Amino acid sequence: MKATLSSKGQLVLPADFRERDSLRPGQVFEVERLDEGDYRLRRLAPAPNEGLVAWLRSCPGGGLPELDPKAETTDSIFPDIQ
């Protein structure tokens, strides 16, 4: 497939590639020059939990629990055992 370099130095990946590989705006790629005229484009793995906060906030009710600041707390994970 062909892609044309824009006057701003941008390449658009063909829609078939974007759909097949679930490419989305904002994903980060590494470009490596192999030789004159030969390049490698590689999608970088997202950081662990990237987008988690946005996903939680999109849940009904905001997704994040509200904590009661007056609630009793304990240092033990087994509160009934002293």
Image (tube, helix red, strand yellow):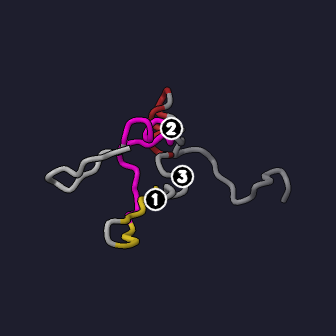
**Residue beneath disc 3:** 49
Q: Nearer the viewer, mark 3 or mark 2?
A: 2
Distance, label 3 to label 2, CA atoms, is 23 Å
Residue visible at 50% across and 38% down in the picture: 20
Find disc 1 in the rendering and name its residue: 42
Q: Residues within 10 Å of mark 3 (few under 14, many from 20)?
A: few
| Residue in the foreground of this view, choosing between 73 and 65 | 65
- The magenta region covers 14-31
Q: Amino acid at mark 2?
A: Arg
Dot 3 amino acid type? Asn
Q: Residues within 10 Å of mark 1 (few under 14, many from 20)?
A: few
Displayed quadrant of residue 36? bottom left
| Mark before the other along the chain sequence, 2 or 1 | 2
Q: Position of residue 58 (x, y in %)?
A: 45, 33
Q: Is residue 55 magenta?
A: no
- Residue shown at the point (80%, 53%) measured from the top left: 78
* Residue depicted at 40% across the width and 71% down the height: 34
- Say whether residue 15 is left or right of residue 70: left
For marks 3 and 1, the one nearer the N-term is 1
Amino acid on which disc 1 is placed? Arg
Residue corresponding to mark 2: 20
- Which secondary structure, mark 2? helix
Using residue 64 as the reference point, say whether residue 41 is left or right of it.
left
Describe the element under mark 3 as helix, strand or loop: loop
In the picture as drawn, the residue positioned furthest to the top comes out as 60
For mark 1, give the secondary structure: strand
The image shows residue 73, relative to residue 23, as above or below, that is: below
